[in-house]
Image (spheres, grey):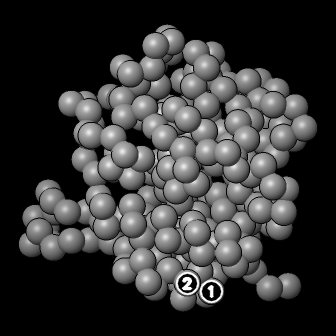
Amino acid sequence: MKKNIIGIAANQLYQNNQAFFDQQLTYTPQGFIDGVHHAGGIPIVLPISEPELASDYVATIDKLLLAGGQDVTPFLYEEEPHPKLGPTSTERDSFEMALIKEAIRQNKPIFTVCRGTQLLNVTLGGTLYQDLSQYPKWEVKHDMFPTVPDFGLHSITVKANSTLAPLFGEQAKVNSYHHQAIKDLAESLVPIAWAPDGIVEAVESRDKNTKILGVQWHPELTRKKDPKEQSLFDYFVQEFE
């Protein structure tokens, strides 16, 4: 049986890598590689490239996975940078947006994590809170730092009959490692999980023929300790068609 090839959009390390003479390094967290391997897929790391090459990259894979990382550039949703905006990468934003559009055009399933979910929302026409201090109902800690985010920090409520419900049930605990969040949800997306303070924690496509699942937490960091988190990779690699 052919194994699904999972394209994982990579990040770049720009600094503090003196062991490699401060060269830019292309990487993805090992948890994504391990999660896909354990699920029976073949992970392929897609380096940041010119947006014009996105169609070629997507054509070589069966499914697309977008990981976490930098803040999303606010100019993409017509806002000036907030004082609490963190590091951004316009090159990464542009390439991953092109990957998302191509995956939808080529009918390839998409799974997004944290920043990946935020960028997905922006790509499809939504906006973000550049920092949770902009959210008037902020009552829950969403950034575990400096605690290692390998266990559930806060609870989520999951929408019944959603893609996520069979995997997580209607209540679960997830880790949390973000200071940006979805503000205005893109019209083509549906919220399917929320934190107790109302922050959107997971989304799926409104069009059932477009296979998109996005989560705000980091299953790659908890998959070893929590079988539900590995089940996200299992479902995406094996069943999400």
Q: Is residue 91 placed above or below 125 in the rendered structure?
A: below
Pick the front one: 207 or 165:
207
Query: Does residue 18 appear left or right of residue 51 in this picture?
Result: left
Pick the front one: 76 or 96:
76
Q: Report the Cα–Cα distance between label 2 and label 1.
A: 6 Å
Q: Position of residue 217 (x, y in %)?
A: 55, 39
Badge 1: residue crowd in 10 Å (few <14, some 14–19, many ≥20): few
Badge 2: residue crowd in 10 Å (few <14, some 14–19, many ≥20): some
In the rendering, which numbered label is found on residue 128? Answer: none
- Kind of residue at disc 2: Ser
Query: Does residue 174 appear left or right of residue 12 in this picture?
Result: right
Instruction: Work out which residue is located at the far front of the displayed protein and give it.
Output: 78
Q: Is residue 78 visible?
A: yes
Residue tagged 1: 59
Q: Position of residue 176 (x, y in %)?
A: 50, 32
- Kind of residue at disc 1: Ala
Local secondary structure at mark 2: helix
Q: Are marks 2 and 1 in contact (CB under 8 Å)?
A: yes
Q: Position of residue 80 (x, y in %)?
A: 27, 40
Residue tagged 2: 55
